[in-house]
Image: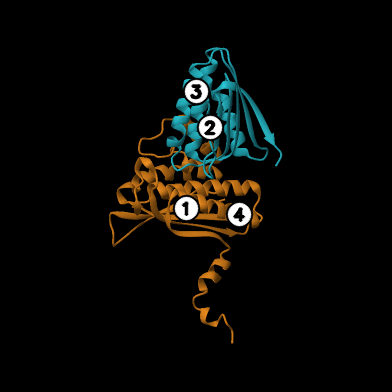
Amino acid sequence: MDNLHIAATATSPEIDFQFDRNLLSLKGESYPENAAAFYTPVIERLRAYLASCADAVITVDVSLTYFNSSSTKMLFSIFDALEHATSSGNSVLVNWYRDDEDETILEFGEELQIDFTGIKFNDCPIVG
Amino acid sequence: MNIFEPLDKDSAIFELAQQRNLIFYHKGYFSHNIVAAMSEVVKLQLEIAGVSASTRRKLFSSFIELSQNIVHYSSDLLVDGGDKGGALREGAVCITNEGERHLMMCVNPIATAAVNDLREKLEPLRNMSLDEIKQQYKISLRAETPPESKGAGLGFLTMARDASAPLEFAFYPRAEDPETTLFCLKTII
C-alpha cells in the first residue's frame, strides 16, 4: 500500500502516514472548511491499511495545536479505527503531543483514553 | 492648521474603536479563505495585546466556531458552495476588551424558519454549569452528527465551554425582509 502524505495548509494539518513503517503522524492546526471532506478520504486509507495489518506495532504521533469542533469529531473516528485494529492482534501506541498548559487538548486526550482502552496512550506535554 | 481637522467628523469611528478597546472587527463576506486570513490577524492582535496563552486559545477557538458558522449558515449568501466548498456568506464579528474580560459578538441573518431550532439549541446551554456543559460535550462528541449540520453539533458547546459566562443571544426580525431574521450571539471570555 502506498504511503499517504498531505502537506499542511494554514487550516489543515500535515498528514504523514508511512504505512510501510507503521508510523502515522498528524501535525498542525485543523479547521478546514469542511472537516468531513478533508478527513473522510484519510480515514478510508487508514482503515484499508489497518485491515491489512496483523501483529503490527503501529505508532501514531499526534501533534495538533488546535482543532475545531468538526475536526474533533473526525479525530474521534480516527481513534475508533485504531481501536478496532487492536482487537486483531495489532499494538497501537499514540503519542499525544500538546502544550502543557492546553487544558482543552489534555481533556480531549482523556476522553479518548476512556473510550479507546486498547490503545496505548502516551500523553506528551510540551513546556511552551 | 490642523491637518486632521477635515477628518474630525469621520474619525469618530476610530475614537469609538479606541474607547471600546476594539481588537478585531469585520463586517462583510466570510469565506473559508477570508476566515483563514482573519485568523492570522486575530492571533497576532491577541498576542501583541498581551493576552494570556490560555485566554488566547479560548478566544481563537470561539472566533473560528463563530466565523465558520457564518460561512456555513448565514442566509445572506453570494456563493452557496455546496459539497465542493467555497461558500461566501455575510455577517459581522467583533472582539473587544473590557478590563479582564473579552467580548466576542457575531451577527448574521438566518432564515426566520430556523429561529426556533437555534433557540432550542442555545437556550438550554444558558442554564448549565460548566460541568454540565462538559458532560453534554462528551455526549455530543460520541453522538451521530445531525444530518443538517456541517459540523458536529459541537460548535455551541465548544463556545459555551470556553466562555466565562452563559452565551447570550438574540433574534431581531427584519421588517423589510420577514423571511430572514438577524441572529446575534455574544460570548464573554
Residue at x 41%, y 30% (from the top left corner)? B144
Q: What residue would you read off at disc 4?
A: B44
Q: Is residue B106 left or right of residue A128?
A: left
Q: What residue would you read off at disc 1?
A: B34
Q: In this view, does B90 lie to the left or right of A27?
A: left
Labels 2 and 3 positioned on one and the same chain: yes
| Residue furthest right in the image | A127
The chain to which mark 3 is attached is A
Q: Is residue B163 above or below residue A81?
A: below
Figure quadrant of the N terminus of chain B? bottom right
Q: Distance between the residues labelled 4 and 1?
A: 16 Å
Residue at x 57%, y 12% (from the top left corner)? A55
Question: Quick one: B74 or B141, which is closer to the camera?
Answer: B74
Total numbered labels placed on residues in the image: 4
Q: How far apart are marks 4 and 3 (CA)?
A: 37 Å
Mark 1: amino acid: Ile
Q: In this view, does B118 lie above or below A118?
A: below
Mark 4: amino acid: Leu
Labels 1 and 3 positioned on one and the same chain: no
Q: Distance between the residues labelled 2 and 4?
A: 30 Å
Mark 3: amino acid: Ala
Chain letter, cyan in picture: A
The chain to which mark 4 is attached is B
User: Which numbered disc covers residue B58?
Assistant: none
Q: What residue would you read off at disc 2?
A: A5
Q: Which color has been applied to chain B in this rendered view?
A: orange
